[in-house]
Amino acid sequence: MSLGADLRRLRRLAGLTQETLADRAGVSVDVVKKLEQGRKTSARLPTLHALAAGLGVELTALLGEPPAVASGSLVDSPRLVALRRSIAPPLLALPPEPSTPHPSPTAVKHRIASGWTQYHKANFPALMSALPGIIDDSRFAASVGTEQQRARGAALLAKSLQLGGHVAIRLGKTDLALSALERAMHAAEQSADVLLPGMISTSVAWSYQRQARLEDALHLAIHAADRVEQGRTDTAEGVRVRGGLLMSAATSYARSGDYERADEMMTSAENAAKRLAHLPPPEDGRLVSVFSRSSVRIERVRLAVQHKRPQEALDLARGMRLSKDVPPSWRAWLLLDIARAHTDLGNAEKAVATLERLHRVAPAWLGHHTLAVAIVRDLWSLPQRPTGLRRLAGRLGVAD
């Protein structure tokens, strides 16, 4: 369904008039009318957050599922059922057997790191096949051995459950995501890694943002960042975890419409990122929050787009040289925001060229972002459609 149709359906289910919804959301009635009538086919995230809050629904109710995960079925796939069982084992059941006899913690850690690589490449089918076994082996490692060995296993369990939470968010299963992340937080608190709770907090805040719980996400990110600052900020790992939390807080501020505070948070994040050049890198960056000078610049571009400053976004992106540790997922977000900026400036040809570039460098991610659908819908509604748009519209299911 289109955004306008979803908005109209949810508004009527809530028993609200267009005027009442506009008042609750703090947006103009004209915006609500244009969306419901199809004269506007998309809206920026701050507007969508406001509308979701006014309707009393999750943000995902308006965003919808991206094309790559929309199933049209109310029945979970066998892979998703297996993931659910590994995240939340049946009550009163014996602990699951490990996938291999006496799995080595080092081997499990390597599998978790490889899982995160698959996640950032959007290789979800392979990841979902492997993830239940990874979580089961991590849970086993957290339950056997000495206290020190169990603490090490708890750290593995926290990272594997965090990965499960991220996959669930991408599949639109926010309740499953929170279930996984709450268990991940419990495991993190049982581990000896003082930075793990901060890492998990970043993921929980993201899940809250997806549910339009911006105030909850903001409070969690700031509180967790303060805890990290009081602990280990003399290592690259500590700087990355705190920096990721600062960017999460900036996102919540921006989506709430407070761009001044968002800018303050991003300035703090930029200052933190500069410290990384003087610190030894993490042993395995795949198991630490994504944070670098490149990721801060990417987030700056995103906030400029959301703040209706497309030219500023393009200026920030121009000549940007991304570091090697920037994962494909973040590169995809950057290209989507550049395409959105070109669309807002009326340069449909450059928008299509940017989306085609995304399809070349990270093809799996094109179908996993509702922003891609929103951009293509806006371009599709133009009187003259640019060359190449029909191919993109076909891939995303946006066509006549």
Image (spheres, helix red, strand yellow):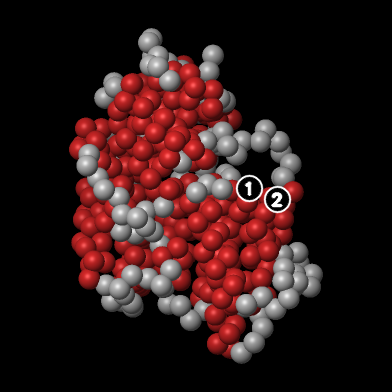
Residue at 40 percent of width and 31 percent of height: 355
How many numbered callouts? 2
Q: Is residue 81 above or below residue 143?
A: above
Residue 304 x/y as whole percent: 26, 40
Residue at 59 percent of width and 77 percent of height: 105
Between disc 2 and disc 1, whose residue precedes?
Answer: 2
Please give the residue where the numbered disc 1 appears in the rendered image. 125
* Residue type, numbered disc 1: Pro
Q: Which mark is residue 267?
A: none
Residue 151 x/y as whole percent: 55, 82
The image quarter containing residue 20 is: top left
Q: Farthest residue toward the right?
A: 93
Residue 26 x/y as whole percent: 35, 34
The image quarter containing residue 100 is: bottom right
Residue 46 x/y as whole percent: 36, 39
Q: In the rendered view, does 245 fall on the left or right side of 64?
A: left
Mark 1, secondary structure of its residue: helix
Please give the residue where the numbered disc 2 appears in the rendered image. 79
Q: CA distance from mark 2 to mark 1?
A: 8 Å
Residue at 25 percent of width and 41 percent of height: 317
Assess disc 2: are there few (<14), some (14-19) or many (≥20) residues with their C-alpha within 10 Å of its C-alpha: some
Mark 2, secondary structure of its residue: helix
Of tags 2 and 1, the one toward the viewer is: 1
The reply to whether callout 2 and callout 1 are in contact (CB within 8 Å) is: yes
Nearer the observer, 71 or 119: 119
The answer to whether residue 15 is visible is no
* Residue type, numbered disc 2: Arg
